[in-house]
Image: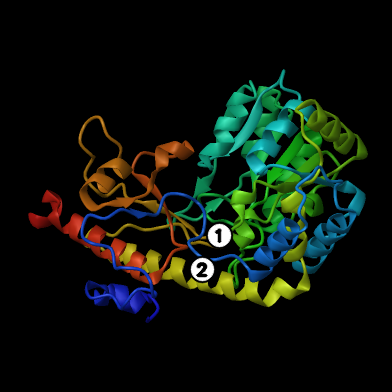
Amino acid sequence: MSALTPEAVRHHEFRHPAAPPAGTEPPRNGDLIGLDIADMDFPTHPLAAVAAHARARAGTMRYTLASETLRDRVAGWYADRHGWQTRRDAVLLLPFGVKTALRLALETCADLTRPVIVCTPVYGGILKVVRAAGADLRTVPLAADSALRYVLDPEELDRAFRTTGARTLVLCSPHNPVGRVWHADELAGVARAAHRAGVLVLSDEVHSDLVHPGGGPHIPWGAAATDRNWIVLHGVGKTFNTSGLGTGFAVTGTPEHRTALLRALGSWGHYEGSYFGDAVTGALLTEATHAWLDARVARIARSTAAVRDALAGLPVPLPSSPPEAGFLLWTDARALPAPPAGTDLAAWIHRETGVRMLDGTRFSGERGMLRLNCATQPHLLAEAMYRLDRFVRRLPAVTGR
């Protein structure tokens, strides 16, 4: 099967897409193509299955102690992949994913008598968790240039800390949905502002291992901070497409944070670590997976670049933010006509094309923005682009030209 390339999409070679992988059928007109959920339509590394099978063959699925070897591997992974030397005793192994970990950190370590700041647009799960924790959510818009490249604005955050009295910032790094890998100068400015205001920074870094070639490096918040008032939240779910395991880990800035999180974990009825999750995570966070992951990220980068080019080449061009990490595209569809009353743009496109995306309003973004997932098979992306092309060509504003 030929790869989806910008040239192929631009010249509509996807009108007759190459054969899909063995055992599958090409999508029929009207079949759902789901580009909405943020996981990959690719297998994980074979070592994940080997580790899970080994645990299953042991014959017992009992309580387990948190793996001290895994703490070392988390610290080693940060050192090898991100150049961050962190302490193994700062690592907390969690039996759930980053969203739940964020809720735990908010309710345990944050001052929820004061507002919590989040930069928007941002992954809607973060917004839901902050509200569910009972926090007074305040948003600070990311600034975007004419190329739809978003930047952190330390001055705006400094102003927000001073005027609202907020003592917590939830950071998304790299950013979902705009795909930015925050630069050292951006992070340094935010770190200075957070330190001046005594702000706890909770950094969601689940896309940090998926930085595109030329798009980084990713700088973990713990490496950028000027103090120890932070908690970094991560896991292998996005990196290796194992989100179904429901595991993650936190790196804490202070022993007090770690102790508080561990105590709260017990009050929720959980133990540190996971019987299957620790085994799979430990197998994946090794040098044996580096080359495989590099190849996976390169493939993702090619797909997102191709889809971005295709969207920009539609009869009504739809520009996207330049992706620097991950497999998501934040697309500006505000040039399209407004959807029918009572529906949002993503729902309208889904109804007309069978291509499902997420509407920008879910991210506290502007109406007319869309987020779509590019981590699926080339023939599905090609078909999705073809359907969007036909949809746009049918719009009155296009047919009347």
Q: Which residue is mark 2?
A: 300
* Residue drawn at x 25%, y 65% as measured from the top left: 386
| Three-letter residue code for mark 2 | Ile
Picture quadrant of residue 344: top left
Q: Residue 172: percent from the left, percent from the top?
A: 63, 46
Q: Residue 130: percent from the left, percent from the top?
A: 62, 29
Identify the image quadrant of the C terminus.
bottom left
Judged from this view, the residue extending furthest toward the front is 59
Marks 2 & 1, CB-CB < 8 Å contact: yes
Comes first in the chain, label 2 or label 1: 2
Helix, strand or loop status at disc 1: loop
Q: Is residue 227 left or right of residue 398?
A: right
Q: Residue 143: percent from the left, percent from the top?
A: 52, 46
Judged from this view, the residue extending furthest toward the left is 400
Q: Residues within 10 Å of mark 2 (few under 14, many from 20)?
A: many
Is residue 174 in view? Answer: no
* Residue drawn at x 80%, y 50% as measured from the top left: 222
Is residue 328 in view? Answer: yes
Q: Nearer the viewer, residue 229 or 48?
A: 48
In the figure, 124 relative to 14: above or below?
Answer: above
| Three-letter residue code for mark 1 | Gly
Q: Is residue 242 left or right of residue 89?
A: left
* Residue drawn at x 61%, y 64% as measured from the top left: 211
Helix, strand or loop status at disc 2: helix
Q: Which residue is mark 1?
A: 326
In whole angstroms, how far apart are the C-alphas of marks 2 and 1? 8 Å
Count of marks overlaid on the render: 2
Q: Residue 62: percent from the left, percent from the top?
A: 79, 44
Q: Is residue 75 left or right of residue 242?
A: right
Q: Nearer the viewer, residue 298 or 309?
A: 298
